[in-house]
Amino acid sequence: MTGPHSSGRDRILAAAEELFAERGYARTSTARLATAAGVPQGLIFYHFGTKEGLLLALIRERSTRTLADLVPSPAPADPRAAVVELWTRLSRLLGEQTPMHRIVFRESEHHPELRTRAREIHDSITTAVSAYLARVTGHREPTPRHHAAARMLVATSSASSVAPGGPPLAAQAVADLLLDGLG
């Protein structure tokens, strides 16, 4: 959670992230959220309108990682090293089982706007990865192969958070496979 000097709104978001991930949206009352955040229950409605408004604000504000964290900049000069670095970052950052992952996976079925937001985030990451792959392979613009490779990288790195426990893919093997296909 956030510290005692953070705003009530920030404390509500932190409590919602923790409780929605742990208990689920439907099983978390606004009274419980207010207690966990150390704020009056009415403050939730003041800042977010409804409990669903709180869920959507949480997803909007806390579910995105900056593309700078996901896509190396500047890219290493060697294409294989560039793809190794990209895969390492994606698998670490997207494959991590975070409270936000649990919330999105659990609640997307019941909240179409959440599902739409998750898709937008996925698409923006895929677009950035596609552009990165194009740059490191000497292309000005991504080709359909770059888009396909980007979608596979993002999906594969994200899938490890859904089904953890398998052996990780070797970054060098991923780089070799991708670059041979993009060649």
Image: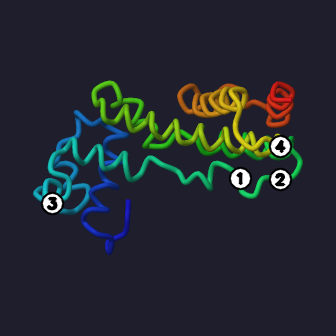
- The reply to whether callout 3 and callout 1 are in contact (CB within 8 Å) is no
Please name the amino acid that badge 2 sits on: Pro
Please name the amino acid that badge 3 sits on: Leu
Q: Residues within 10 Å of mark 2 (few under 14, many from 20)?
A: some
What residue is pinned by disc 1?
72
- The reply to whether callout 2 and callout 1 are in contact (CB within 8 Å) is yes
Q: Please name the residue shown 38% across and 53% down the image.
A: 61
Please name the amino acid that badge 4 sits on: Gly
Q: Please name the residue shown 34% across and 36% down the image.
A: 114
**Residue nearest the viewer, comparing 169 with 48:** 48
Instruction: Indicate the position of residue 132 as horizontal and vertical percent values.
Output: 71, 45
Q: CA distance from mark 3 to mark 1?
A: 40 Å
Q: CA distance from mark 2 to mark 3?
A: 48 Å
Residue reaching furthest left? Answer: 42
Residue reaching furthest right? Answer: 78
Quadrant of residue 96 within the rendered picture: top right
Q: Residues within 10 Å of mark 1 (few under 14, many from 20)?
A: some
Report helix, strand or loop for mark 2.
loop
Q: CA distance from mark 2 to mark 4?
A: 13 Å
**Label placed on residue 43:** 3
Report helix, strand or loop for mark 1.
loop
